[in-house]
Amino acid sequence: MYSQEIKIPQKRIAVLIGKKGETKKLLERKTKTTIHVTKEGEVTITSEDNINSFNAQPIVTAIARGFNPDIALMLLDESFGFELISIKQFSRNDKDLLRIRSRIIGTDGTARKMLETLTETFISVYGKTVAIIGKTENIDLSKRAIEKLLGGAPHGNVYQFIEMQKKSDLI
């Protein structure tokens, strides 16, 4: 028996479990694992096969970092990957952290949506992290663009950078 333990925010427990436990059951069925969640947010993933518990871990982490379970389940496809970026290293204090988070999200989520569209990825800003789900070839571009924004680059320059990278990949 193999197991993995993950701590998730209490606010995300209900999302992981789902209505009447449906999300948790679906995840268990698709990954051939058993998932136990405590009220404190401690998640234990167990399986007969180590690879199954290994595959379930990023899905649970993605849900914990703000993704919709349907998007997180895309990680079952081997061509998709998951990346987590800490915002803390780009900020000096909590006020700075809030400003930096806002740069990634934009007014009414416009910056995040633009990044998702240009890089063909899904992005979640939750707590002190930015998480990315997408095809593995798109994740690196999305990560580099987000890091540029976190570093203070103007949005227009970052969008131009993405377009230039995509054009150079076609050549």
Image (cartoon, helix red, strand yellow):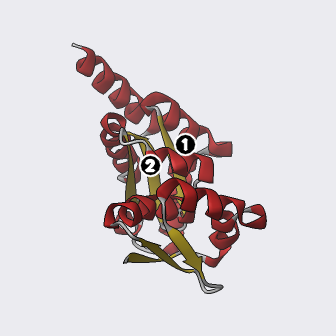
Residue plotted at (43% across, 64% down) = 57
Residue 70, position as x, y percentages in the image:
61, 47
Q: Amino acid at mark 2?
A: Ile
Quadrant where the C terminus lies? Answer: top left
Q: In the image shown, does 146 or 23 lie closer to the viewer? A: 23
Considering every residue shown, the one lying at the far right of the view is 20
Residue 107, position as x, y percentages in the image:
65, 44
Q: Amino acid at mark 1?
A: Arg
Q: In the image shown, does 114 or 46 lie closer to the viewer? A: 46
| SS at circle 2 | strand
Q: In the image shown, does 83 or 56 lie closer to the viewer? A: 56
Report the label total.
2
Q: In the image shown, does 95 or 23 lie closer to the viewer? A: 23
In the shown orientation, is residue 21 left or right of residue 33?
right
Q: Up-down: is 48 above or below 111?
A: below
Q: Which residue is mark 2?
A: 132
Residue plotted at (62% across, 56% down) = 26
Q: Which residue is mark 1?
A: 112
| SS at circle 1 | helix
Residue 97 in view (yes/no): yes
Residue plotted at (63% across, 44% down) = 109
In the shown orientation, is residue 19 left or right of residue 149?
right
Considering every residue shown, the one lying at the far top of the view is 171
Residue 160, position as x, y percentages in the image:
38, 26
Q: Up-down: is 122 above or below 94?
A: above
First of labels 1, 2 by sequence position? 1
As measured in the structure, the alpha-carbon distance from the residue carrying label 1 to the one carrying label 2 is: 11 Å
Q: Up-down: is 85 above or below 106?
A: below
Q: Quadrant of residue 18?
A: bottom right
In the shown orientation, is residue 59 left or right of residue 161?
right
